[in-house]
Structure formats: C-alpha cells, structure tokens
Image (cartoon, grey):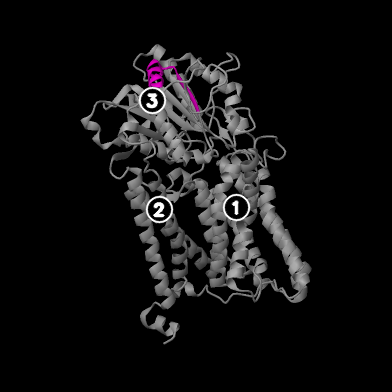
C-alpha cells in the first residue's frame, strides 16, 4: 500500500509517523535534559535554589537566585557571597561559583543586574548611587538573613559585575560610616575586570577600606587593553593598575600577599592576613573573557580565595576544590537544546503533513544555478565567496563595541546606538549588519539573475516567492504555531525545573512581559533578511542536479562559514601571539572586545538558519515558511538575553 493510501486510511503516513516519533523524542530530550540541569543546579539535592525578588532603595525590582545549603539549619551562621554577571548576561552566568560555593556551605545570591534578566531599571531620579547595579541591596539582604554570618560576607562579579563589586564595597563602607548596621564585604573577587586607579588619588579607592581584595583575569582576555592598559591578558601583572591594587610592584600570579608587602604568604599566613582584611592576590588562567564563566579553573580560584578570605581555610578539607558538579547544569541544558531544535524541525514538518497545511506544499522549483562547464564553476565560486565573506568583513564594523550602561555611566557610540525604538544595544549592531547584508544580497541576486540566469532561461519562479494570500496566511500560521509550541516548551522547563534551555551562552529562555515589545520591534528586520537569504540560498547557492547533502552543506557553510573563518583567524592569531587578529573596531580605534565575544553566539545560530531555510524550502517549494521560522527563532534568541537600554 502506498504512503498516500496509508495516510488516507489512518490519517498519518509513514513520514508522519516518523515525525511524530521525532517530536516525542524532542519533548523527551527537553524533559530529561531539564531534570539533569536541575540536578546540577541544586548540586543533586544538596542545595535549595529559590528565585527571590525585592525592591531596592533606587526603586528597582531586583530578581536573584538564592542558593542555600540544605544542612544550614543544623550549623552556625555561614559565610555568604553576592555574585553578579557581566554585561548582556544574567544570573545564570554566575551559577558555576554559586553551585560550588553553596554545596560547600556558603549562602550565595546571584543577581540579575539593572536592565538585565528579570531586573528592572533603577529610578535615576533618586539621589542615591546606582553604579553598584543592585549588588549593594543584595549584600544588605544577605546580611539580614539569620543563617548568614554578617561578618563573613563577600562580593564577586564577572566583567561589568566585577566593577559593580568594587562599587558595592565602596558604597557599603561609606554607608557604614553613617549607619553601623550596614553590612560590608570582608572579601572582593573581581573576575575578567581590573582594579581601578582613581586619577585624583593615584590609588584604588578600595584600598582605603579594610577588605580582602583579589582579581582573576584570563591570559587571552579580549579586554586586556580596556581594563589594564596592556596588550596581552597574560601581562596584566605588569600594569601600574595592578601595582596600585596590590600596593607594591612585582606580585606574581597565584600567590597571596599582605597589601603593600611583596613577601608571598603561606596558606596559614594568608588566612591570618584575611582575618586582618589585608589579603591581596592576582590569578590568571589560559582563557578568554567569556570562558572565565565556564571554567573549572575559575571555580578552583574562587573556592580557594573565598575559603581563605571568608571560611578560615576549612573548605578544601570538606570537598576538594577540583570536585565540581556545576557542569551537569550545562550538560542537561545541552540535551534540552538538542531537543528544542529537533522540536522546531519535527513539528514544522509534521504540520505540513496535515490536510490543512498540505495546500502550501509544492514541488521544489529548479534552481537558477546549473554548473556544466569550468566557466560555470568559476562564476559560481566568485559569487559564493562574496556571499561567504561579506558578513565576516562587515561584522566588526557593524556591531562595534555596543556598551550602554547609564548606571556607571558608560556609553560607547555605535552605528546604530540605542534610541526609543531600538532599545537593545547588543542587538542593534546585529540588526544593522543584517540590513547592510540585505541590500548587498539583493544586489548580488540582481546581478546573477539579470546578468546570467535570465539569459539561460531562468525564471523568477525559482525564488519560491510566488504565493497566494491564503497560502501566505497558512505559512504564517504554521510558523507561529511551531514557535509558540517551542516557546511553551521553554516556559515549561523554566516553570517546573527552574532552568533555561541552553548550553553555555547558547541559550533560549522564557522572556519577561516587557521583552515582548522588543521582540516585535526587531522581528520585521530579521524577517526581511531571512526572506532575502532564503531566496539566495535556495535559488542560487543550490545547484541543479547535485546531491542534496552537497547542496545542504553549501547552504549551511555559506550561512555561517565566513563568520567562522573570521573567528578562527582572530582567535587563532591570539592563541599564537597573545594579540587579537582583529584588534580594533574599524573607524573607531576602540578594542574589538564585545563584537568578538558576541560572535560566538552567532556562530551557533546562523548555520541552523541555513538548515531551516533549506529543509522547509525543499518541503514546500516556497521560501515563506523557512523565512518566517528563522525570523522568529533568531529574534527570540537575540532578544531573550539582551540588555535593555534606558532611553532618557
């Protein structure tokens, strides 16, 4: 019996049954992955993790995760640490430290900083400091908990969160002069940032207070010149800024010192220095800026430092520093991510087997590209290379250094700076890049079609753009249904297991209500790009009478291969020399810091969009379903974790 007859008999053909199985597998992967991720988040039951919210003195509704050891009721008050993520991230970026410290007896609060994650903006009209991004209020919150030792508090943060840690400490000590009940930190650990020298004082202001102070910085950190004024991260110990923070010249990585004294301390001497609150240290590791939030070595450094600075050196005897379980959170998230992407494909293809949506399924039209001679190969190669490399050459210039932190304040102008419509600074550069590429690709298509393909009998029917109003409506409905179901799956994982769907920085997470307005604002700009590239990939990149695997490989590679080659050169050069291959943003002289970091996230999603464009074009013979799905997927991906700029 044919597949069509089988479908007519039981409503589902063989392909439909396979797709149902794949859909069930995708849901199972998301559920199992979320269970594993929740296990890692709670150190497999050793830690209670609770989302909390509170309004701080600047009128911001702060959201945070509170990690509390299970056995805390049976022991004396314990040390506690406030942890803050970096720019354009959220509290999950500090989960490696939060999980490992809490399973060893610390209470940890990992916050969403102002305008990040679920935390709102501060009220800038309040006559109070706001450059601590919410950490000061979190420190006071911890200090009031009955099971926390108020005299053993610490603060730590990555990148912008490191600077917030400094500002929190300074603010706390100044406030304590007026109110003795104010909680102050006993220890500060800055990661992927630097000590700071006040030009007016020629010293780091933190040194004026009794507090233990340390920094951890990657040997290949992209922000070495920005934070330390040195070309290579490995050389930050030679910076005058580091000298001021330590109080003397010549400090070596990994040693503990008393402030102002160049004699290295033994472990017991370091514990004694911590009791006097004069401990200083600088650490390094063979990592880039972002990898510091995804590193066992980074965890070892944090555990050793806070053990000595806050816990009297007792942690290592309980659980070795190298015994770590935080990666299980990412293993589970990675499994969920595979399930999420499989769901996207399997559900979309399954709906296309249903009678209602079958009317938008058409035979795939011939491509405009046929290669039969050496000349054809040469012409194809030229246009392929242009399409491949254009994103690579334009990316850093378009994205730039999208820093917009009005709370510090810190604002670096970019080509598409935040405004009342485009309020996501880290997304703006990507949108601008897509707009420029759209114009370029339209021109490229026009040259190929009118200059070559039309003369050989090519037709615009190959674009897959022809569609009736009804077919467009059904294409839109199908894409929206797939997206909403996938988003529902992400929301279910967040609600029942308290985890996101993702691995490292490749994350899809449920969005707060206010993010949806941004999603809708950016969606049209991503749609026009994926509509144009959908045509270019399927009508020109695809070669007539070639094997499907080769066409798919060509499409996926041209979608993200140029960016990958750029990143390989940029970071490969740094791996060899310690210096970036593309050191600055063209036309600005500013360090190519954030654009290089953000490209890693694009390297994950862009090849997937090429696969989506190919799979749904081949199935429907039209470009619409794949283009709409890509626009929804990418807008969700870049919006759900993006920083929101406060437009004044």
Residue at left offset 45%, top offset 66%: 346
Disc ID at residue 490: 2
Residue at left offset 49%, top offset 62%: 479
Q: In this orientation, which residue lies closer to the viewer: 355 or 232?
A: 232
Whether residue 178 is visible to the viewer of this picture, yes or no, is yes
Label 3 vs label 2: CA separation?
40 Å
**In the rendered structure, are the residues bearing label 3 and label 2 in contact, judged by CB atoms less than 8 Å apart?**
no
Residue 206 lies, in percent from the top left, at 49, 18
Whether residue 64 is visible to the viewer of this picture, yes or no, is no
Above or below, comparing residue 635 to residue 346 in the picture: above
Q: Residues within 10 Å of mark 1 (few under 14, many from 20)?
A: some
Above or below, comparing residue 448 to residue 240 in the picture: below
3 or 2: mark nearer the eye: 3
Mark nearer the N terminus (3 vs 1): 3
Residue 352 lies, in percent from the top left, at 47, 71
Label 3 vs label 1: CA separation?
52 Å
Question: Does the magenta-highlighted stretch encompass residue 332?
Answer: no
Mark 1 secondary-structure assignment: helix
Q: In this orientation, which residue lies closer to the viewer: 572 or 338?
A: 572
546 with respect to 355 (left or right):
right
**In the image, which residues are magenta?**
267-282
Residue hosting label 3: 308
Query: Where the C terminus falls, by quadrant?
Result: top right
1 or 2: mark nearer the eye: 2
Disc ID at residue 525: 1
Q: In this orientation, which residue lies closer to the viewer: 251 or 331?
A: 251
Question: Does the magenta-highlighted stretch encompass residue 271?
Answer: yes
Q: Residues within 10 Å of mark 3 (few under 14, many from 20)?
A: many
Above or below, comparing residue 261 to residue 95 in the picture: above
């Amino acid at each position: 019996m044919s597949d069509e007859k089988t479908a007519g008999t039981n409503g589902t053909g063989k392909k439909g049954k396979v797709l149902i199985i794949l859909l069930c597998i995708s849901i199972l992967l998301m559920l199992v992955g979320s269970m594993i991720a929740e296990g890692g988040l709670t150190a497999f039951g050793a830690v209670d993790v609770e989302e909390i919210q509170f309004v701080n003195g600047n009128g911001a509704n702060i959201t945070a995760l509170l990690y509390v050891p299970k056995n805390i009721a049976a022991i004396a008050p314990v040390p506690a640490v406030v942890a803050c993520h970096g720019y354009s991230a959220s509290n999950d970026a500090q989960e490696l430290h939060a999980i490992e410290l809490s399973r060893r007896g610390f209470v940890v609060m990992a916050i969403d900083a102002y305008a990040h994650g679920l935390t709102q903006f501060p009220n800038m009209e309040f006559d109070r400091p706001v450059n601590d991004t919410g950490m000061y209020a979190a420190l006071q919150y911890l200090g009031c908990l009955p099971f926390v030792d108020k005299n053993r508090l610490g603060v730590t943060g990555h990148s912008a969160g490191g600077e917030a840690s400094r500002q929190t400490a300074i603010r706390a000590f100044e406030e304590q002069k007026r109110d003795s009940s104010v909680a102050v930190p006993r220890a500060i650990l800055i990661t992927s940032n630097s000590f700071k020298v006040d030009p007016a004082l020629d010293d780091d202001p933190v040194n004026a207070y009794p507090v233990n102070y340390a920094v951890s910085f990657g040997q290949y950190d992209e922000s070495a010149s920005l934070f330390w004024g040195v070309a290579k991260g490995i050389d930050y110990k030679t910076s005058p800024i580091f000298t001021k923070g330590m109080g003397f010249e010549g400090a070596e990585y990994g040693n503990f010192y008393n402030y102002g004294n160049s004699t290295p301390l033994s472990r017991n001497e370091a514990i004694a220095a911590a009791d006097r609150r004069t401990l200083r240290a600088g650490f390094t590791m063979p990592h880039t800026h972002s990898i510091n939030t995804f590193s066992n070595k980074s965890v070892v450094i944090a555990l050793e430092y806070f053990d000595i600075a806050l816990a009297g050196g007792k942690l290592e005897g309980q659980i070795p520093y190298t015994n770590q379980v935080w990666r299980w959170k990412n293993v589970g998230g990675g499994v969920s991510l595979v399930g999420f992407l499989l769901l996207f494909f399997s559900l979309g293809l399954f709906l296309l087997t249903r009678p209602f949506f079958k009317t938008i399924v058409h035979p795939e039209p011939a491509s405009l590209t046929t290669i039969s001679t050496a000349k054809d190969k040469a012409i194809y190669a030229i246009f392929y290379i242009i399409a491949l490399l254009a994103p690579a050459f334009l990316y850093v210039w378009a994205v730039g250094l999208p820093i917009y932190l009005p709370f510090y304040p810190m604002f670096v102008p970019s080509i598409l700076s935040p405004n009342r419509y485009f309020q996501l600074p880290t997304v703006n550069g990507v949108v601008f890049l897509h707009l420029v590429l759209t114009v370029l690709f339209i021109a490229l298509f026009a040259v190929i079609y009118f200059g070559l393909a039309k003369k050989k009998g090519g037709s615009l029917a190959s674009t897959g753009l022809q569609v009736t109003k009804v077919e467009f409506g059904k294409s839109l409905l199908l894409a929206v249904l797939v997206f909403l179901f996938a988003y529902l799956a992400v929301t279910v994982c967040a609600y029942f297991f308290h985890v996101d769907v993702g691995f490292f920085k490749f994350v899809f997470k449920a969005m707060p209500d206010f993010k949806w307005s941004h999603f809708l604002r950016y969606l049209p700009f991503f749609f026009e790009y994926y509509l144009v590239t959908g045509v270019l990939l399927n009508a020109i990149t695809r070669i007539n009478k070639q094997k499907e695997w080769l066409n798919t490989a060509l499409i996926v590679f041209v979608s993200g291969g140029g960016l990958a080659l750029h990143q390989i050169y940029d970071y490969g050069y740094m791996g060899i020399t310690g210096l970036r291959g593309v050191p600055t943003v063209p036309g600005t002289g500013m360090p190519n810091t954030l654009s290089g970091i953000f490209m890693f996230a694009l390297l994950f999603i862009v090849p997937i969009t090429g696969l989506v464009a190919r799979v749904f074009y081949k199935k429907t013979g039209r470009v619409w379903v794949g283009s709409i799905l890509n626009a929804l997927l990418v807008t969700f991906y870049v919006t759900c974790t993006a920083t929101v700029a406060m437009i004044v």
